[in-house]
Image (spheres, rainbow, N blue to C red):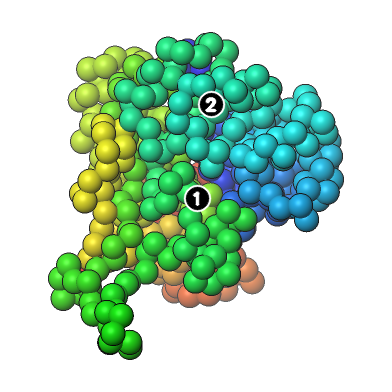
């Protein structure tokens, strides 16, 4: 859905806190998962109460909320799906993201007033598939990650303007076609297509010759071994003009298990890049270095353009490790400061009095500040906050306002 003549920026949220962050930091729409029937069972996900509050919060700012229900459903799931959609009908999300035709049919029967978006899990790779889903009543189809920009343009040329195209432009890539992976189920009994993936694509593998059982031979890229299935992360921040030229309606960010820092950083940077381009293509081009630097401040596994410019090659994989690159560490989100200037926070990672931190603002401004003092919930002054989730109040020598993200440059090995 074009927003003010621009592509929609669609951002993920793992919790109510992160949903509010996404809205404040530039998302046009947010997609979330409930406690059932989505593909991120390990994410915190939303209770029905939090979902209702999140939808009201987003709507207050003129933003939209989509709920994922994109599992591959079994018979045992169907009655629960029907009941779940009946509950969603009451809190009025703006769309449901669905991949299973049976679940699609239940949504049409139970809550026909809610838009249905067809998930990338449905393997949407040609315009006839798009037209099929439109005939069933879909408002939007999410393109498979395996499509090139050329193929997306061809789809747009062969479908009505009223049928929206949503495309992933940033985030983790799956080793398996459109995320339909069986490795997790095979190794651990946890089904990726029911939201319980253990990410075995990030594990280290060896080979064994049939006549030598128990003799494991390393598949070596270097002395550390190899991670033969481990893909780089998608990043199209340098290619916004090409995405716009392809007439994609919604730019989708992956990451429903990510922190508020990740969501704020990625949402703010893509928001700036999109807005800058529409102000002036030259302005956008002049700020490419800034976008690259900013997007690298959140966690990532090196970057690739995926399939957008042709088939993936060995350059889209990471063979020598399975770790994230981490530019900055998330310390917490600022609450409303007290009269004496102390800012309430819930600690996400340990930091200390005297640390130099960065106060990240929704406007795009970043302020370097020193932690001058800290006190715990009882008001006692402390030198650091070592306990996860600790409620603290912090005095900075810079202005930290409610919903500002506090981050610190990560220590490099």
Q: Quadrant of residue 245?
A: top left
Give the image location of residue 333, x and y in percent: 52, 52
User: Mark 2: few, some, or many residues within 10 Å (few <14, many ≥20)?
Assistant: some
Give the number of the disc on residue 25: none
Ranked by sequence position, the earlier of labels 2 and 1 is: 2
User: What is the C-alpha distance between the residues marked 2 and 1?
Assistant: 18 Å
User: Mark 1: few, some, or many residues within 10 Å (few <14, many ≥20)?
Assistant: some
Q: Nearer the viewer, residue 335 or 232?
A: 232
At 51% from the left edge and 17% from the top edge, which residue is drawn?
2
SS under mark 2? helix
Say if residue 132 shows up in the picture.
yes
Give the image location of residue 129, x and y in percent: 53, 26
Q: Nearer the viewer, residue 213 or 37?
A: 213
SS under mark 1? loop
Q: Nearer the viewer, residue 364 or 119?
A: 119
Q: Nearer the viewer, residue 206 or 380?
A: 206
At 22% from the left edge and 17% from the top edge, which residue is drawn?
282
Decide: is 300 above or below 151. below
Left or right: residue 172 versus residue 120 is: left
Say if residue 302 shows up in the picture.
no
Give the image location of residue 120, x and y in percent: 51, 38
Give the image location of residue 41, x and y in percent: 61, 58
At 21% from the left edge and 36% from the top edge, which residue is drawn?
289
| Residue that carries the numbered disc 2 in the rendered image | 129
| Residue that carries the numbered disc 1 in the rendered image | 180
Q: Quadrant of residue 217?
A: bottom left
The quarter of the rendered structure image containing the C terminus is bottom left
């Amino acid at each position: 859905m074009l927003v003010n003549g621009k592509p929609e920026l669609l951002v993920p949220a793992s919790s109510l806190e992160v949903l509010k962050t996404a809205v404040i930091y530039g998302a046009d729409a947010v997609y979330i998962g409930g406690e059932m029937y989505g593909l991120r069972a390990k994410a915190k996900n939303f209770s029905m109460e939090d979902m209702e509050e999140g939808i009201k919060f987003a709507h207050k700012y003129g933003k939209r909320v989509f709920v994922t229900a994109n599992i591959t459903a079994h018979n045992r799931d169907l009655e629960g799906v029907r009941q779940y959609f009946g509950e969603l009908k009451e809190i009025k999300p703006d769309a449901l993201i669905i991949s299973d035709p049976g679940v699609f049919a239940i949504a049409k029967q139970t809550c026909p007033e809610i838009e249905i978006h067809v998930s990338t899990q449905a393997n949407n790779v040609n315009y006839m598939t798009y037209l099929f889903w439109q005939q069933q009543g879909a408002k939007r189809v999410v393109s498979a990650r395996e499509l090139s920009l050329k193929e997306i343009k061809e789809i747009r040329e062969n479908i009505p303007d009223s049928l929206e195209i949503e495309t992933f432009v940033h985030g983790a890539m799956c080793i398996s076609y459109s995320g339909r992976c069986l490795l997790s189920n095979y190794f651990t009994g946890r089904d990726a297509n029911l939201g319980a993936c253990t990410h075995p694509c990030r594990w280290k593998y060896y080979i064994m010759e049939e006549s030598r059982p128990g003799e494991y031979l390393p598949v070596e890229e270097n002395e550390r071994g190899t991670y033969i299935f481990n893909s780089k992360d998608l990043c199209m921040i340098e290619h916004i003009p090409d995405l716009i030229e392809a007439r994609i309606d919604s730019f989708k960010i992956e990451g429903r298990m990510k922190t508020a820092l990740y969501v704020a950083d990625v949402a703010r940077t893509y928001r700036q890049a999109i807005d800058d381009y529409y102000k002036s293509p030259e302005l956008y081009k002049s700020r490419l270095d800034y976008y690259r630097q900013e997007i690298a401040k959140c966690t990532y596994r090196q970057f690739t353009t995926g399939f957008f410019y042709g088939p993936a090659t060995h350059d889209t994989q990471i063979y020598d490790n399975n770790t994230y690159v981490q530019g900055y560490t998330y310390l917490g989100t600022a609450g409303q400061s007290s009269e004496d200037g102390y800012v309430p926070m819930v600690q996400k990672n340990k930091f200390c009095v005297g640390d130099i931190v960065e106060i990240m603002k929704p406007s795009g401004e970043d302020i370097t500040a020193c932690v001058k003092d800290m006190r715990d919930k009882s008001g006692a002054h402390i030198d650091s906050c070592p306990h996860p989730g600790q409620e603290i109040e912090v005095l900075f020598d810079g202005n930290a306002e409610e919903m500002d993200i506090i981050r610190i440059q990560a220590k490099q090995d």
